[in-house]
Image: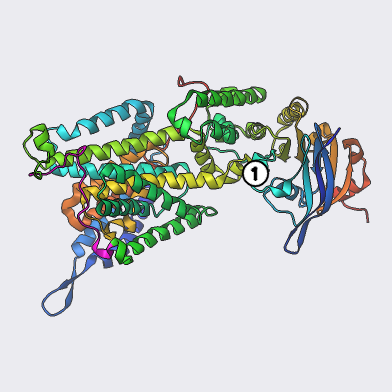
Amino acid sequence: MTNLLSVEKLTMKFGGLVAIDDLSFDAKNNQITSIIGPNGAGKTTVFNCLTGFYKPTTGQMYLHQAEKKVSLRKYTDFKIAHVAKVARTFQNIRLFPAMSVLENLLVAQHNELMVASGYSLYGLLNLKSYREREQLAVNKAKYWLDIIGLTHRADDNAGDLPYGDQRKLEIVRAMCIEPKLLCLDEPAAGLNPKESAELNKLLKFIKTEKKTGILLIEHDMSVVMGISDHVVVLNYGKKIFEGTAEQTKNSKEVIEAYLGVDE
Amino acid sequence: MEKQDIIKSFKDSLFTGLIALALFGPIVGLRTASKGEGLFITPQWGVVLLLVGLCILGRFLININSARKTEFKFLSTLTSKFSNITDDKAKHFAITGILFAVVFPFLPFTDRYFMDVAIMILTYIMLGWGLNIVVGLAGLLDLGYVAFYAVGAYSYALIATTFGWSFWICLPLAGLFAAFFGILLGFPVLRLRGDYLAIVTLGFGEIIRIILINWYEVTNGPDGITGIPRPSFFGLPFKRSPDEGEMSFHTFFGLEYSTMHRIIFLYYLILVLALITNYFTLKIRKLPVGRAWEALREDEIACKSLGVNPTNTKLTAFAIGAMFGGFAGSFFATRQAFISPESFTFIESAIIVAIVVLGGMGSQTGVVLASIFLIGITEIFRDLEQYRMIAFGGAMVLIMVFKPKGILANRKPTILMHGDNK
C-alpha cells in the first residue's frame, strides 16, 4: 500500500501557544486514517493546516499523486480543493442552507462547469455543449444522492434536511470535487446509532469503490474502531501513539491521555 | 382575545406615544420662523398631538393584530396570499406586467406627468435589478451603489460632449467604465463582509461624489455638465425644426411635432434597458457563476473548501452590478441633458438598497413591486412637499412590519431535478 499523504515535522504556533508540536504521520491510499485525542489536542488545527486555512509555522505536508509529490504548503485557500484535490467537511456543518440539495452539489463542481460554460459566455448563449456538460454534472449529483438515499429531496433546501442527512450531504458534496484525499471533521457528531452505522457504510464505500484516502477526526469510538485502518492519537499537539484500531484500544498511553494517570 | 392582552397592548401603545412625543416634540413642535428682525419660535402643538395620537393608534392596531394568533390576521394574510399568487403564477404576472408596461404610454389617462413618474420608477427598477446582483445574489451589502450610477452618467456625459459620439456607442463605454470602477472598489473590500463592507462601500460612494465636486478641470465641479446630447431615434433627432437638409423624427414619419415623442422614446429606452438587465440576471443566476454568487452569500468558507475562487466570484459580481448601474447612469444623463454631483448623494444609494431589501433579497419581481410602492407613494404625496418623505418612511415601516423578509421572499432553485410538477 503506497503513501498518500506524508506530514513531516508539522508545527503550528499561535503566538506563544503551540497547537501542533513536531507532528509526523503518514496516511495511505485506500485507507481510513483516524486522528483522535482529547478536546483541544490540535486535531482540527491539523486539518486547517492540511486544507490551507492555516499556514503552518514549520514542517511539510506532501500529497503523493501518480508520479509526483505535491507540497500542500504551496497551495492556500481554494487552490487546495481546486488544484491539490484535497476536500474537507466541517465540525459544524457548512452547507449552503438556502440553496437546494442539487445546487449544493453543483457548486462543488463549479470549476469544471465554469470552463464548460466558457466563463459564462457559452452559458449565456445557451450552447448545446454547455447544456450537455451541465446534464453530466446533474447526473453525477444524482449518482451521489442515490447512494445516500436523498434523491427525492434534491429540490428541497439543504437547510431543511434532518441533521443526519445534512452530514451525509456535506460528505458527498466534498466527494463531488473528486478528491484524492477526503478530510472529515467529526462526521458522526450528533448522529444517532442508526445514522452512525449508515455513515460507516458510506465511508467504507468511498474507501473501497472510489479509491479515496480518508482522514477522519472523530470522538465517536464506535465509528473510529469500526472503520479505521490506522489511528493517530494526539494530545497537547503531540503524537502520543500510532497503530491499528486494536492496538490503540489497548495502549496504555492512550488510556492515560483520555482518563488521566493514577496517582 | 384576553382582556390582559388588550391592557398590555394599550400600555405598550402609550409607551410608544411617549417616545413619539419625545421625537416629534422638538422636531415638529418647535418651528422657527423669521419675522422682521430675527428668528422666533412658533409652537405647533396641535400637529404634535395629531402625530403622537396616530402613533399610539397605529401601535395599538399592530399589537391587536399580532395578538390574534389563531384567528386570521388581516394584513399578514392579505400580504402572504399576495406573495403566494405571484409565486405560483410568476410567469403570468411577469408577462402581464411587461404587456402593461409596453402599452402604458398609449393608455388614455397617461399624460406627461405619468410618463415622467413611470420613467423614474423604471430607472429605479433597473438600478434595483443591478444592485440585486451584488446584494441579493452575492450577499455583499453595497451602500455606495450610486457611485457607479454617477460614473456611468459622467462617463456618458464626458464622452458624448467631448467626442460627439452617438448614444449607442457611449452607452457600452459608460457601462465598461462603471464595471472598471466596480472592480476598483472590489479589490480593497475582498476580505470584508457585512457591516464593514457596508461602511467601506458607503465611503466609496462619497469619495466619488467628492471627486466629482472637486475635479473642476474635468467634471466642471458643482456646476455640472450641461448640453449633454439628447438621444436620437436611429439618427433622427427629436427637434421641432431640424437643420437644413436634416430629417427629424416627426418630419420623417409625417407626424405633428410633440414633445411627447421624445418622452415616449425615453420610456421605451429605459424599459428595454431594464428588461435586458432582468433577462441577464435571470440567465446568469442559472449559470455556475450565479450559483457561486449565491453560495458565497450562504457560506464563504464552504466555498473555499470546494475550490470556488472567492476573489473572482466577488469581483464579477461587483463588476456586473456596477455595469448595469453605469447603463442606468448613461440613461439618466441623456434624459436630463444636465448632470451635477447633486444628483448622486447617499440618499439615492439608500433608496436603491431599500428597494432591494424591501422587495425581498434576490427577488426580481420584488424589486419591481418595491420600486412602484416606494417611488409611487412618494409621488402620490408630492403635494405634501417636504412631508412626503414621511410617506416614504411610512411605506418602509409597513413593509417591515408585515413582510419582514421583503415583499417576495421566496427563492426558487436555479435548477430542478424533478421538474416543475410539484
Q: Is residue B239 in the magenta section?
A: yes
Tell me the quarter of the image containing the C terminus of chain A.
bottom right
Quarter of the image holding residue B28?
bottom left
> Left or right of A115: which side holds A255?
right
Where is the N terminus of chain A found, in terms of image quarters?
top right
Residue A237: x percent and y percent?
81, 53
User: Can see residue A220?
Assistant: yes
Instruction: Look at 9% across and 40% down and name the residue there.
Output: B258
Q: Position of residue B255 (x, y in %)?
A: 8, 34
Residue drawn where x is 83% and y is 51% of the image = A23
As for residue A140 lying within the magenta part, the answer is no
In the image, taking residue B45 as reference, residue B176 lies left or right, namely right
Q: Residue at x 29, y 55 (%)?
A: B158
Q: Which residue lies at the image location 20% right of the left edge and 41% below the top edge?
A: B232
Q: Which color scheme did the rendering employ for the protein?
A: rainbow
* In the image, farthest residue toward the left: B256
Which region is colored magenta?
A: B220-241
Three-letter amino acid code at the position of disc 1: Lys
A68 or B311: nearer the viewer? A68
The secondary structure that dominates the magenta segment is loop
